[in-house]
Image: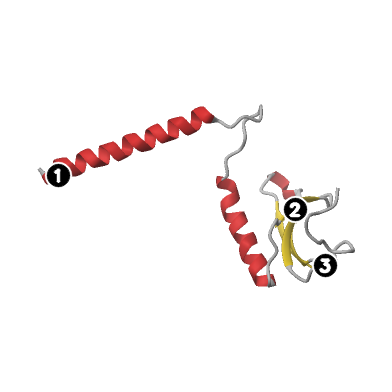
Amino acid sequence: MSSPFPLPSEPNANMCSYREKSAREGGGCMWKYELFDDDGGRWRWQLRGDGGQVAMISGESFGSRAGARRALVQVRAYAGQAKLPSADGVEDVLGEVLERIAKRDEEERTRRATIAALN
């Protein structure tokens, strides 16, 4: 299956690495983020596992190395907040419903407190 966007024609071509050690005890696992310019002359980021395999790659290309790096920083900052799918592949609908109920209840408490303060 071919890639929907141009990738470097040779491994590690024009790559700039940002290494991170694992937080695991011993720090033995070494994953690294890389910025590279693709065959189309645009910049992308990717995450490589300690075996050299590409685990993630940006779906968007950027006009500058700095733009790709900014996007990578955002991915690193927000990825931990992303929801995981349930084990059977079905979204956790019950969890979402409970979150909505809790939010609605909080909004109702705030509304009632505001009305009470005005009276």
Residue identifier under label 2: 31
Sequence-earlier tag: 2 or 3: 2
User: Are there few (<14), some (14-19), or many (20+) residues within 10 Å of tag 1?
Assistant: few
Residue 46 placed where, x, y %? 74, 57
Instruction: Report whether residue 102 is seen.
Output: yes
Residue tagged by mark 1?
117
- Mark 2 surroundings: few (<14), some (14-19) or many (≥20) residues within 10 A: many
Q: Amino acid at mark 2?
A: Trp
N-terminal label among 1 and 2: 2
**Three-letter residue code for mark 1:** Ala
- What residue is at 57 percent from the left and 40 percent from the top? 83
Real-space CA distance between mark 1 and mark 2, rounded to the nearest whole angstrom: 54 Å
Give the left or right position of residue 110, taking residue 41 as reference. Answer: left
How many residues crowd around disc 3 within 10 Å: few (fewer than 14), some, or many (20 or more)? some
Position in image of residue 35 (x %, y %): 74, 65
What is the secondary structure assignment of the residue under circle 2? strand
Which label lies toward us, 2 or 3? 3
Q: Is residue 69 above or below residue 81?
A: below
Q: Quadrant of residue 19?
A: bottom right
- Most foreground residue, 107 or 32: 107
Q: Residue at x 68, y 67 (%)?
A: 62
Q: How many marks?
A: 3
User: In the displayed structure, does residue 6 sit left or right of residue 114?
Assistant: right
